[in-house]
Image: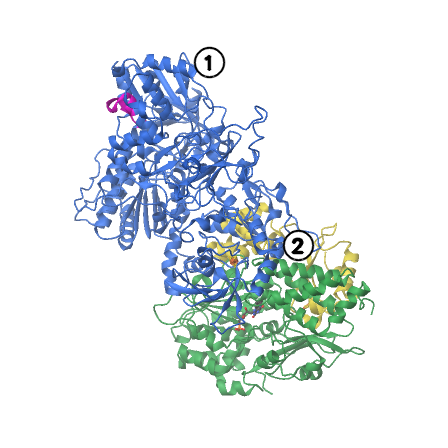
Amino acid sequence: MEKPLTQNIRPDGTPLNLAEYEKAGGYQGLRKALTQLSPGEVTQLVLESNLRGRGGAGFPTGRKWSFVPMGDDVPQPKYLVINADEMEPATFKDRLLMEGDPHQLIEGIIIAAYAVQAGIAYIFLRRAYVTARQRLKQAIEEACAKGYLGRNILGSGFNLELYLHMSAGRYICGEETALLNALEGKRAIPRSKPPFPPVVGLWGKPTAFNNVETICNVPHIIRHGPVWFKDLSRVPDGGTKIYGASGKVRRPGAWELPMGVTIREILEEHAGGMQDGLTLRALLPGGASTDMLTAENLDIPMDFNSMQEAGSRLGTGTIVVIDDRTCIVGLLANLMQFFAQESCGWCTPCREGLAWLTKILNAMEQGRGKPEDIDHLRLHTRLITLGRTFCALAPGAMEPLQSALMYFEDDFKRHIHEKSCPWRDL
Amino acid sequence: MVTIYIEGKAYKIKQGQNLLQACLGLGFDLPYFCWHPALGSVGACRQCAVKRFKDENDTRGEIVMACMTPADDGTRISINDPEAVQFRASVIEWLMINHPHDCPVCDEGGECHLQDMTVMTGHNYRHSRFPKRTHRNQDLGPFINHEMNRCIQCYRCVRFYRDYAGGSDLNALASHDHVYFGRFQSGPLESEFSGNLVEICPTGVFTDKSLKSHFTRKWDLQTAPSVCVHCGLGCNTIPGERYDELRRIRNRYHHQVNGYFLCDRGRYGYEFVNSTQRIRHPLRQAGSREEAKLMMETEALELAAAMLADPGKVIGIGSPRAFLESNFALRALVGPERFHAGLSDSDFKCLGTGCNILQRGPVPAATLQGVALADAAFVLGEDVTQTAPLMALNLRQMRYGKSVRIVSDFQVPEWHDAGVREIGQLQSPALFNATPYPTRLDDEAMRTVYAAPHDLVRLGFAVLAALDASVFPMPDVNDAMQALANEIAQALLKAERPLLVAGTGCGNPALIEAAANMAWYLGRKGSAAAFALCVPECNSLGLRLMGGLDLNSAFQAIDEGRADTVVILENDLYRRADAQAVDAMLQKARNIIVIDHQQTATSEKAHLVLPAATFAEATGTLINNEGRAQRGYAVMPPKGAVRAGWRWLQMLMKAAGHAGASSWLRLENLTADLVKDMPVFQPVAGLDPKPAMPTPGGKLPRQSHRYTGRTAMHADIDVSEPKPPADEDAPLAFSMEGYDGRPPAGLISRVWAPGWNSEQSLNKFQSEIGGPLRGGDPGRRLIEPPASDDIRYFAMPEQEILPGADEYLLVPIHHIFGSEELSMASPGVARQAPQPYLALRPEDAPVGDGEQVRLLVSGKSLVLPLKLLPGMPERTAGLPDGLPGVPKMVLPAVVKILGKGSIEK
Amino acid sequence: MLSEQEKKEIEVVAGHYPIKRAAGIEALKIVQKHRGWISDEVLSHVADALEMSPTDLDAVATFYNFIFRRPVGRHVILVCNSVSCWIMGYDTIVSYLKDRLGIGFGETTGDGRFTLLPNVCLGACDRAPVMMIDDQLYVNLDAEKIDKILGSYD
Ligand SMILES: Cc1cc2nc3c(=O)[nH]c(=O)nc-3n(C[C@H](O)[C@H](O)[C@H](O)COP(=O)(O)O)c2cc1C
Ligand code: SF4
Ligand code: FES
């Protein structure tokens, strides 16, 4: 089984330096792109590879790049922004890539920037990733020294400045337009679309925008071609995916697997199954903002389309396992608290609605729930949907709630009737 | 025109709107918070949700925000769709979770957009049972009260304050449901436009602190359409009165003049009306106020008749802060050949030049609305923020105009505020600001330059030479100035709507001439060039158009004994001329009659003082800086002996035996004679709109239909309800009786519509949202210049006042709070005014900041604390204009400045 | 006043953006690195250096959660309170920490050693429960480990 993204990552997690990376075949994709391919051809290869964004929404990467206006008369400079914010709870895949093989990301960035002809690139990195920051900084310096960054890269005439920008915290910064505002030194409030970032992005200039994992695929696609990339996958969406599992499984962790493996395969073969004496009751398949699935859904392949058909989303592909001794209502109170606190405060349903839901869920968990509370929870899941809020944060917060109400309504009722949490002393 | 369908019915509407605008424009009630016609859409509150359908077969539809959705041809929406209705009700419920429900003690109550929208959506039961979030409030200075717990986070305050008005000391702080709108620390808001927060905020977070000190609900205020008297722009206002006291000023929308906004001088300067310095009775004085004796009106008129017995010896001095009609009546009393304008020497000259330019043409005077639409502007010599504040606010919108043009390339509609600002964020508008000292508009300008007035004149002529060297000779300027001139010329040539701004601020008419030259030249080249003239006072232009002699000739007439009696109308001469000259005249004159509403240094020396009405108690006409005649109506009847200036003059004429005046029983009789005598004022004759509906006595009520206490408010005097005072001069009555529907545009005393108690009801008064009022905007322009090709350009003046080796050129520095006479009677305005000072650049300073310096001007001396002002041009000193404690001087002038040591000597 | 070192570092990051004020957060982080937290006075100085108003800088400073606008101890403990850590025993870890330190969230120990703050997911969910002290991540926490870790800070 080929594992292009993690093949270089050592068991102890120490990163490859430039020479080691080059020895492993690194920067050959870049060389090929810059010396043999036109920017349009690079985009075309990525388009053909069926690479879909790994940041959560799954938008085809090649399509996204093709929206960036090209030619001499478009506004300059153009930008490439890499989303390395990774603040979705239970997600830790980008960290693995940045800490273990920083040059892979840098190579991908240079190729992507070349494809859209961006002159300046930023990596927007979350504050807590201190190790990733040190390693990326080191790698950027090496790449600069070697001429992979800067002016006239590999004699191609292409120039690129790459900056590492550390976030100051806030989940909303992961939302791409909020991230642009954060980069501009403003409050990280999302922007309304249209205009879309490829046309009006950072500083009002055309801006391509991708997740770390997405970009790490790019050098391999260029080196080995789109057919090879598609063949890595078990489904039409190309490539491998970094899946993860946390919660009370035997071996929590992250693994690079073909796109489209089943949940069961991930949890049983790689995560080692549940800890002794526990059974799986539910799971969040792709981070905190995805609909819960249950033990009945274990044979569903983890890819964009299959997850959608099952009523959830692939999201970030990192699974939270919920065992039978964990209280679903308590877990939702925890999730809702997170989303309410991370709301940027711009639009009403999110700012006020999530705070109210948090209070309701906390009251329930503490035995102060009222029968009508369930109606309020359910009503909110119908009120707060995409398009009614300004961005996807609040609708994302509704996903675990609405699925929990569907699968586990009794848990909520018991909290109310028993006036305490039945799982408290289990 | 495009067709949209609402509830299945077709409507034709103007293209390029969003659905919210379209619905409101069609008269639908659709609730909203974050949208504002002047601020555009950002989609934050989610209150304006409607259902949109793909086509006639689509029954599911989707919820969209009306303010963020273009009203494209064929769009189908439903406002009444149950899902949309439910969502809107939920938005209000969310907003009200933390709202304190303190309407009974909230100053906004009764004109609160949040109240209106809550009722409109039908939300009436709070489901949340949890404690509310609370905030601590800040002290934001004398104008604005802060009560954050009422906030619904619509973000309008910061969008106005920062994005629209350029302020930087108010912002959104914190995040999620802790968002707080305030300052870094407590302290007075710095923007000159902070008062607009009162109207922009849809609830009671930002309220009017001056109103709070004598609070009255909107419906209990007696109101009338009025015009601001605190600068020359003529912003339209709605003052409110209760118990004979003026209680607040609100914006009165005028599409072409002030739009939705006012400056803080205009909003808060009104308290002179209630001031203890008011003159309320005729007074007989023997040259000083201490010996003043109250007189009966008849006695006063007898005394006046005696003083005016020899008509050949009577001169009159008019006023730029008095109504056109009052000035005309004075001119009629003394005769045109003995009528003096009552302007400072430099204002007289500058305004004369300005009037001449406006009348000769061919370029029209810019409206304020036109200022905002300029795509290049050159401000020559004027500190616009301080002398014509709303013009500065409109110049700040040039940025937006420019973005809009960029926006057409990006397919982002003009109303998409956030999109427009993102695209334009790193660009500066082509605004060039050339002034004698740093100004508050500099942050917005592409280039700024600070130079002495005569150097600014050179810059103006250098730009002209750069425009066309074959028409204008190049003055002698240095390379930097030359480069700047070229850049400005290029920007002006490229623009479709270039704007030239100049005014009386520097006291140098050549600046106005240079600006006019540029406007004329560009206009003749085919662009829609405009010329904006800044004038100091509310009727400066009207007075100057009336002709009259200058003030010096009045001094001479008395001095030479050609006259011995002077009638001074609403004017403190000590603000106009050198104190010595005024003293000399007032000492020598045998009879001094002053008609004014405020005690001034001049009224103190009068022999007879007659109590004039303020703008709040009288009806009359003011001519603004663009030559627009606007009528302001009395808000309350004058009390006791107080009379409109022109009424006193009419009575004086009668007492003195003048024939003509006997017919002037009403304002309209007088204006009829005015336009007959001076055809330039012809449009004034038709200024009063006629109410469309028959109403008692043909008049509209000044009191709302909810006015309370009418039978009780005077019960301590008389239990029977008094007959409302008559008003001969206005088509308005001091009463709540009568038609309270939509009045003609010029007679809007308050905005209100069923279900819309806040000023947002304005939507119901406009012919299109954010456009002209229904029936056309009020007021009439006196001057539309002839389209002539025969332009005689002004030449650059030869003479320059230049400081000698150890001298400085003294120039006036203007202050929005401090430089204007009447507004300084408001305690809040006085608090925001600076203390007297002399400004120098640090390099030229003989002593440190705050230390005393002595200036010597033509033999006289004056001691002031020094203020270091980096950016002041070399060998130029600044003196605050009109500030109490700073004597009037003829500026610019050459002065000597001495440091500490010489003061002690 | 800002130190020369701080000014220099701010100048460098400001150069990464088309306008100075875009570096607001970066600049605050630089100063926070040297001083632990951002006082009103320091915030005003940074605003001056970036040619922006203190209010505008505070608007961003208070938006993000890694800018401390109140004094903190010598070491800041960030305990992950997100979902995986919550499942894996966050409650126990936090009560233990609070007991050991004798403080609640948002408080600083009397000796000025530690400030305790909750924090959203630290991205180490496979090794939950976790916390971070200053820049150091600690994983798979239990009472014993916490004792040892705390003991290693002065
Ligand atoms: C509230 C919110 C938080 C997000 N956080 C992240 C994140 O931390 N990392 C990320 O890559 N994408 C995140 N996204 C998704 C991004 O907006 C964006 O779709 C993605 O980064 C695009 O990259 P891709 O096309 O390579 O997937 C978030 C979206 C939302 C609505
Ligand atoms: S955002 Fe729109 S959606 Fe909201 S009210 Fe404001 S106007 Fe509307
Ligand atoms: S949930 Fe704690 S590290 Fe992720």
Instruction: Please give the range of residues in magenta.
Output: B331-344
In the image, residue A174 lies at what x, y percent? 56, 66
User: Could you tell me which residue is drawn at 50 percent across and 87 percent down?
Assistant: A227
Which chain does the residue under circle 1 lie in? B
Residue B713 x, y percent position in the rendering: 57, 30
Where in the image, quadrant-wise, is ligand 1 located?
A: bottom right
In this view of the protein, can residue B589 be seen by the observer? Answer: no
> Does residue A265 appear to the left or right of B604 in the view shown?
right
Name the mark nearer the viewer: 2 or 1: 2
Q: Colour of chain C?
A: yellow
Q: Residue at x 78, y 64 (%)?
A: A416
Q: Is residue B551 above or below residue B199?
A: above
User: Toward the viewer: B489 or A354?
Assistant: A354
**Does the magenta segment cover residue B341?**
yes
- Name the residue carrying label 2: B125
**What kind of element bears circle 1?**
helix
